[in-house]
Image (cartoon, rainbow, N blue to C red):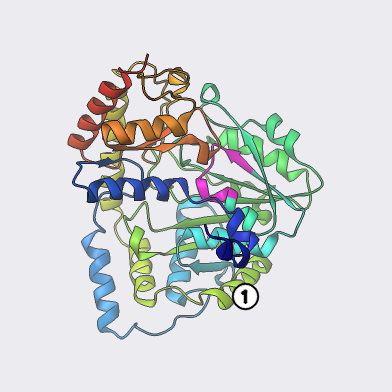
Amino acid sequence: MDTIAAQLLSRRVLEMEESATLRMAQLARNLTAQGLQVINLSLGEPDFDTPDHIKEAAKKALDDGYTKYSPVPGLVELRQAIVRKFKRDNDLDFSLNQIVVSNGAKQSLANLSLALLNEGDEAIILAPYWVSYYEIIRLGGGKPVAVKAGIEQDFKVTPPHLKAAITEHTKFVLFSSPCNPTGSVYSREELKGLADVIAKHDNLLIIADEIYEYINFTDQHVSIGAFDNVRDRTITVNGFAKGFAMTGWRLGYMGAPAWIAEACTKIQGQVTSGANSFAQKAGAYALDADLQPTYEMRDAFLRRRDLTLQLLEDVPGLLSNHPQGAFYVFPDVSYYFGKSDGTTTIQNADDLAMYILENAHVALVSGSGFGADECIRISFAASDEDLIEATRRMKEVLGKLK
């Protein structure tokens, strides 16, 4: 960066880390542009197309003239559908004024950070965590406090560890279940334990990121906001990207206490205003329509999970978890730290991810961006052929590290 840029850019952007997933995806695209056959297992994006009935609903909305600005918190019909969905699927009771629709769940989280945090406030994030949590909290002026669980705990934080991290400065606790990057799913009992800890602190909020709700391989998805002792202090964030394969539609939402929803609407009104109007019509249709296509995608991801775990068993040195949701495996790769092929020495997961990209032409993401320096994230949102070939390449190049 030249001197002028360093002088003129804000400290905010200069200190902000680039998204690790987006950075690796760009590196993969750069190699592909050079003519190399790169298998990209770095992005958190379903490889399925949006179901036809949702696309048809968007086309109809266009024909019906939904091409104008939408209300800042979202179209009434979509917010009504979200209220029904929360009650039907999550045992959550919201009124229309408690729902805010945004340009993706990521914007919902950014709105919350800007609406809730002041300089000096702390926000606990359960680690491993999604890469953007950390920087979104810093963008809001807060201090991220990571509470980490390792692979031996299935990457799930226990109530005592959470309790020890709470201070008088803690404003909220943020986590995802099913989790990106680990695929771990908190059970009802585990969530109840966390809720009981938080409920003892009168001014402590919960932000539950449930974007992977429909990609859940357990018997039931449980929302922490359904527990009575934290019901009135939980913000539940969700969206359409993962469960409906609508990543490019940029449509997310939250259900929150009315005063928080109002504050987020105020911020969004000054930043982007309402989300895409015809996408919202399609989203409303999707929530009330048959979920069979979503369940078929979930079942495909489950089969791919089992295939991926089977393939990784043949790669020495990888200690894998057994994800119960999402579409990631998050193996511990510390076995390779300190090893070398004679040219490159692997010091950490960053080095290993780059080594695999440059030598096997397989794009993965280092765990450092997720708060777990000893791991890498592998997405199995890919074809069987790509998963098989990617694992073969990884085994071959990792075998050169001694």
| x and y, in percent, of residue 29 in the image | 29, 50
Magenta segment boundaries in residue numbering: 125-134
Query: Is-magenta flag for residue 220?
Result: no
- Residue drawn at x 46%, y 64% is 82
Q: Secondary structure at mark 1?
A: helix
User: Is 208 above or below relative to 248?
Assistant: above
| x and y, in percent, of residue 64 in the image | 28, 84
The C terminus: image quadrant:
top left
Labels in figure, total: 1
Residue furthest out toward the front: 3
User: Is 7 above or below relative to 315?
Assistant: below
Q: Amino acid at mark 1?
A: Lys
Res. 106 visible in picture: yes
Is 375 positioned to the left or the right of 249 in the image?
right
Q: Nearer the viewer, residue 147 or 58?
A: 147
Number of residues whose C-alpha sits closer than 10 Å to that of mark 1, classed few (under 14), some (14–19) or many (20 or more): some
Q: Nearer the viewer, residue 26 or 222?
A: 26
Q: Nearer the viewer, residue 362 or 375?
A: 362
Is 332 positioned to the left or the right of 291 in the image?
right
Res. 93 visible in picture: no
- Residue drawn at x 69%, y 35% is 162
Is 139 positioned to the left or the right of 101 in the image?
right
| x and y, in percent, of residue 194 in the image | 65, 38
| x and y, in percent, of residue 254 in the image | 53, 61
Q: Which residue is mark 1?
A: 266
Is 52 positioned to the left or the right of 118 in the image?
left
Q: Nearer the viewer, residue 213 or 40?
A: 40
Residue furthest out toward the top: 402
Location of residue 119 (image quadrant):
bottom right
User: Is 38 above or below relative to 157?
Assistant: below
- Residue drawn at x 75%, y 41% is 166
- Residue drawn at x 61%, y 53% is 15
